[in-house]
Amino acid sequence: DFHVSFAEKPCENFLITCNLYFNDDYDGGDIVFYVNGNIIEYKPKAGDVVVFPSGSPEFLGDNPYFHAVKTVRNGEKFISRNYLRGSVF
């Protein structure tokens, strides 16, 4: 995802993240968003596609969009993660 340490360096950073979830037979692993002072937690189901801003300041909007993933406590989680990249100048 977007790296804050690279915010002012000329480089490519991720603008949009797209996750495809292949399974849901594990414990934990919820995706957590912090948006506009609200915490939103979601446990993806097999076949779900979740698309969200990666945290880059180039993404339109006035508020940062932070995210994290909880630890998988039991089982294995299989996903495909894809990114749309942008250049920061």
Image (cartoon, grey):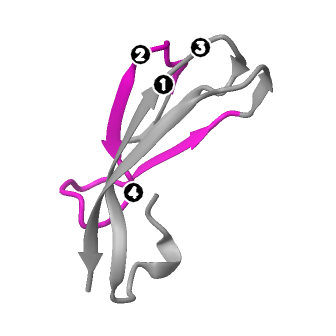
| Span shown in magenta | 41-70
Q: CA distance from mark 4 to mark 2?
A: 24 Å
Q: CA distance from mark 1 to mark 4?
A: 21 Å
10 lies above or below 62: below
Q: Which element is circle 1 on?
A: strand
Q: At label 2, which amino acid type do we have?
A: Gly
Q: Position of residue 37 (x, y in %)?
A: 44, 40
Q: Position of residue 20 (x, y in %)?
A: 42, 29
Which sits earlier in the primary sequence, circle 4 or circle 2?
A: 2
Label 2 near label 4: C-beta < 8 Å? no
Which sits earlier in the primary sequence, circle 4 or circle 3?
A: 3
Q: CA distance from mark 1 to mark 3?
A: 8 Å
Q: CA distance from mark 1 to mark 2?
A: 5 Å
Label 3 near label 1: C-beta < 8 Å? yes
Q: At label 3, which amino acid type do we have?
A: Asp
3 lies above or below 39: below
Where is mark 3, residue-wise?
A: 24
Q: Is residue 49 left or right of residue 34?
A: left
Asked which quadrant contains residue 78, the reply is top right
Q: Which mark is residue 55?
A: 4
Residue drawn at (67%, 33%), measured in percent from left and top? 70
Report crowding for label 2: few under 14, some 14 to 19, many 20 or more residues within 10 A (C-alpha): few
Asked which quadrant contains residue 48, the reply is top left
Where is mark 1, residue-wise?
A: 21
Would residue 29 be counted in the magenta stretch? no
Which sits earlier in the primary sequence, circle 1 or circle 4?
A: 1
Who is closer to the viewer here, 50 or 66? 50
